[in-house]
Amino acid sequence: MAILKVCGIETEYGIVTRGFDVSPVTSSSMLINAYAGSMRQKIGWDFLDEHPSADARGTVTEASFPPEIETHLVNAVLTNGARYYVDHAHPEVSTPECLTPRDVVLYDRAAEEIILRSIASVNALLPDGQEIGTFKNNSDGKGNSYGCHENYLVSRELAFGRLASHITTHFVTRQIFCGAGKVGSENGAPDVPFQISQRADFFEEEVGLETTVKRPIVNTRDEPHCDPLKYRRLHVIVGDANMSEVATFLKVGTTALILAMIEDDQFPDWLTLRHPVTHIRSVSHDISLTSTCELQDGRKMTALEIQEQLLGLCQRYVRSYGDPTSGDAEEILREWESVLDCLKNNPEDAADRVDWIAKRRVLEGFALRHGVSPLSAQLRAIDLQYHDMRLDKCLALRVGLRTLVSIDDVHRAVTNPPPDTRAYFRGTCLARWPQNIVAANWDSIVIDTGDEILRRIPMMEPLKGTRAIVGELLNAVNSVEDLLLSLGSTDTPGWDPLMTPEPGW
Amino acid sequence: MLAVATVEGMADRIRKTTPQTESQNAPASADMDVSTASGQRLKAELDDLLDEIDEVLETNAEDFVNNYVQKGGQ
């Protein structure tokens, strides 16, 4: 049976220095320290739970290169439940765990706001003529890529092989509405003037553990950050970072629905691809949306036709099985149907929500007006500047993208956690007792009460520790000592607001 | 300072999405006229957008693009 789709996004931002020259690790650290310096106390990350070399297939091949944990780099936990850190020479923000795709959009926007505030803080400290800049994209146009990863909670009962082959169909074809668009091609891919996805050129395997080389369409990292006997965390590395809020909503929402459908064994085996690696590129390189993908049974369908099939299946699934996205399914299905309708009849109509179409409209208009060639520096500059986080330079802010969340809600989400996941407990504890929390990670926090012993509070259930469950308890206690007493010893059987799952999910 | 700037950025987004709503509410009875008018309006919008982009685009596109190198990502 499908479980509720707790989900989140982690985005690596591109980073540059202007007027001075330091390594990207240094500039990323400066950026995060400038932001963290404004917090009451910087809370470190606890690495005890990190196992990036664990493989969901149960074995690791000698040829694979699991990512290493970089414990020496800057790492902060925020009161909204997010993690803000230096990862592989980029500043990265992981949203807190969210119960709905709409909340993922909200906290992804909050992450952008955190980057903006960091930039303002660090640039205020730098001498005149020096500044740090950031970009929300996935490629430098020179063969280097960096990720925007999604995470979804799935049941451990689901066999990983089936999950991988089924979800691949969606990962290859969903780019037609959540691709961010790119001028040119990279990584040895055939030349094209413009393509749908920033990332597609970098995927070389169907399934694997790597994230920095020979990237696989389905990543097998088996690091659930919660009860490993009950859950998997599907770590999705194949997506583009979106400037469009609707595109982020669709990317996460459609994927959550399809994962639940796979868990309930309602995904038909015929709808799997024979050559996913070939097609992730061919779909990205075909802005006419007419090229076909070969299915396992030999049939050929366009990415758009495959998406129409997936939409129909999800409409029926939600009617029969209910909503695994805690209230967003109706809006996801409506937006999905609408965007596919636009792509089928008049793709230009999707310029208010699909990044690659909005970007292409500007590129074509500019090329026509100024008579520049398809791969000129001006067009590459427009491509890059679409993702520029400077408000006075960002082109995505100027192309008429529809928004889903208000700026007031974004500002609140910068400091406040979502109320309906364990992020509520983490964020609230960090806000209330920063001087007592020595470290935190996704599934525990470590508290120093002044005793000789540090106390670890485990949070192995993503849907415990919510405001509904611990709100009153947190309001009633005045100190961490009271909190520990109220929670009781975690090895005591009985009521435990952070560990025991609610019946029925 | 920053909060104000951010609010302005968001106001920009909201302002520019307004025409889309108008087009969705256009009467269906005069499809051809609406289509022509809509096409002209879209062109005018694109012209305005391109004017703005000409203003904010980095003056040295080549340096801007060449200096953007990102190594070591996931």
Image (cartoon, coloured by chain):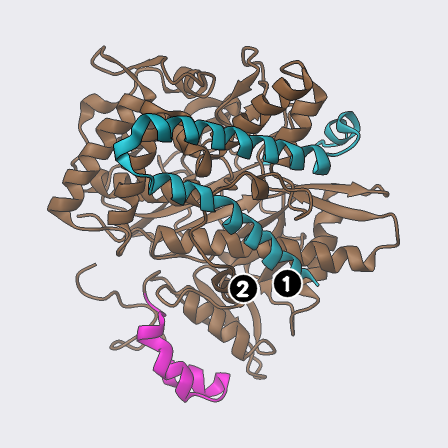
Q: Residue furthest right?
A: A128
- Image disc number at residue B3: 1
- Amino acid carrying label 1: it is Ala
Q: Residue furthest left?
A: A320
**Percent position of residue A398, x then y:** 58, 41
- Image disc number at residue B16: none
**Percent position of residue A217, x then y:** 42, 28
| Residue in the foreground of this view, choosing between B28 and A381 | B28
Residue B53 among magenta residues = no
- Image disc number at residue A411: 2
- Amino acid carrying label 2: it is His
Residue A479 among magenta residues = yes
Is residue A75 toward the left or the right of residue A360 in the image? right
Identify the secondary structure beneath mark 2: helix
Q: Is residue A165 visible?
A: no
**Percent position of residue A362, x then y:** 57, 28
Give the residue at x 17% y 28%: A268
Q: Quadrant of residue A22?
A: top right
Range of the magenta residues? A464-487
Q: Are marks 1 and 2 in contact (CB under 8 Å)?
A: yes
Give the residue at x 44% y 27%: B39
Q: Colour of chain A?
A: brown
Chain identity of mark 1? B
| Residue in the foreground of this view, choosing between A298 and A396 | A396
Q: Colour of chain B?
A: cyan
Chain identity of mark 2? A
Q: Is residue A410 visible?
A: yes
Discs 1, 2: same chain: no
Is residue A289 toward the left or the right of residue A80 in the image? left
Q: Residues within 10 Å of mark 2 (few under 14, many from 20)?
A: some
Q: Quadrant of the C terminus of chain A?
A: bottom left
